[in-house]
Amino acid sequence: MSVLEVKDLRCSFKVQAQRVFGKQRKDVLDGISYTIHQRETVGILGESGSGKSTIARCITGLLHPDGGSIVFRGLNIFPDTGNRKSIRRKIQMLFQNHTASLNPRMSVKQSLLEALNSQDVSSNKKVDLEKIQDVLDATNLSYDILQRYPRQLSGGQRQRVALARSLLARPELLILDEPTSALDILTQVQILHLVKKLQDERGFAILYITHDVASALEICDRIIVLYRGKIVEDQETSRLLSKPRHPYTKDLLIASGLPEPA
């Protein structure tokens, strides 16, 4: 069953023209189409400026595409943006900048309670604390972390708190936008393995946006390769690794230290 269907998605930005006065539009996404199924992990690979993060921001409504359609669980959320309110909690995003994703003036407890209160679901203090304890256990965070502030946490702890906030919404699609690039290698591995474990337990789909070929090959069921705003590859991970179709994909694999595909 499909969770997300993206068809012919197009997006452009105004940029300063080099040879003329004023601004002109630069195409960032040029006819992107793909589907994500339940419990599936799909990776999007590409160089900086290829449009990876733009895709995520179009899905979450942070950017308004120029055209195409986005359908979540059979409900059109673009161009029919009026439907977004009913599904906004079901799509959660874990950002690269874990520091900016948390309010520095809020303790971890306040931040998690804020996430619960935004759900417009009647509850009580006991139930809320039970939900918070559940996500702390799920993300391997100790209960005493609730009284701390973001500045008192390590990068890995901040990203786990951000993940815990996302889990409180019970997402059906979790978008990871370079979520570990600012972390050390060991913490990167721990966070990605944790997310995959939670996926197995809770059943959400994952869209993993990264430039890290090795991690995409490790955790993704399928990989999409973007090149200059277009999809040049969309294959199951094992197939892509053995028989990439596009020269740019081969270059990515070789640049990451893998042997040249046959």
Image (cartoon, rainbow, N blue to C red):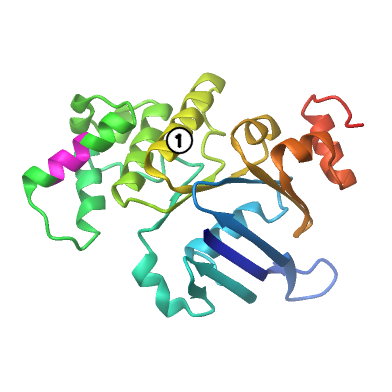
Q: Is mark 1 on a helix, strand or loop?
A: helix
Q: How many numbered marks does the figure carry?
A: 1
Residue 230 or residue 22, whichever sits in front:
230
Q: Which residue is drawn at 64% across and 75% down?
A: 68
Residues rendered magenta in the picture: 128-133
Residue 215 to residue 98: above or below: above
Whole-percent x, y for residue 1 in the image: 52, 58
Residue 261 or residue 236, whichever sits in front:
236
Taking the image as shown, residue 253 lies to the left or right of residue 96, namely: right
Whole-percent x, y for residue 150 in the image: 31, 34
Taking the image as shown, residue 85 lies to the left or right of residue 190, namely: left
Whole-percent x, y for residue 256 in the image: 77, 29
Q: Main secondary structure of the magenta part?
A: helix
Residue 155 to residue 121: above or below: above
Query: Where does the C terminus fall, quadrant-wise?
Result: top right
**Neighbour tally class for label 1: few under 14, some 14-19, many 20 plus, Cα within 10 Å:** some
Taking the image as shown, residue 159 lies to the left or right of residue 105, namely: right
Query: Quarter-wise, where is residue 251 in the image?
Result: top right
Residue highlighted by disc 1: 195
Whole-percent x, y for residue 35 in the image: 61, 59
Q: Which residue is drawn at 52% across and 19% down?
A: 186
Query: Quarter-wise, where is residue 138 in the image?
Result: top left
Residue 190 to residue 162: above or below: above
Q: Does the magenta stretch include residue 132?
A: yes
Q: Does the magenta stretch include residue 226?
A: no
Q: Which residue is drawn at 18% across and 31% down?
A: 147
Residue 154 to residue 15: above or below: above
The amino acid type, in three-letter code, at marker 1 is Val
Q: Residue at x 77, y 76 (%)?
A: 21
Query: Quarter-wise, where is residue 223 in the image?
Result: top right
Taking the image as shown, residue 17 lies to the left or right of residue 51, namely: right
Residue 16 or residue 128, whichever sits in front:
128
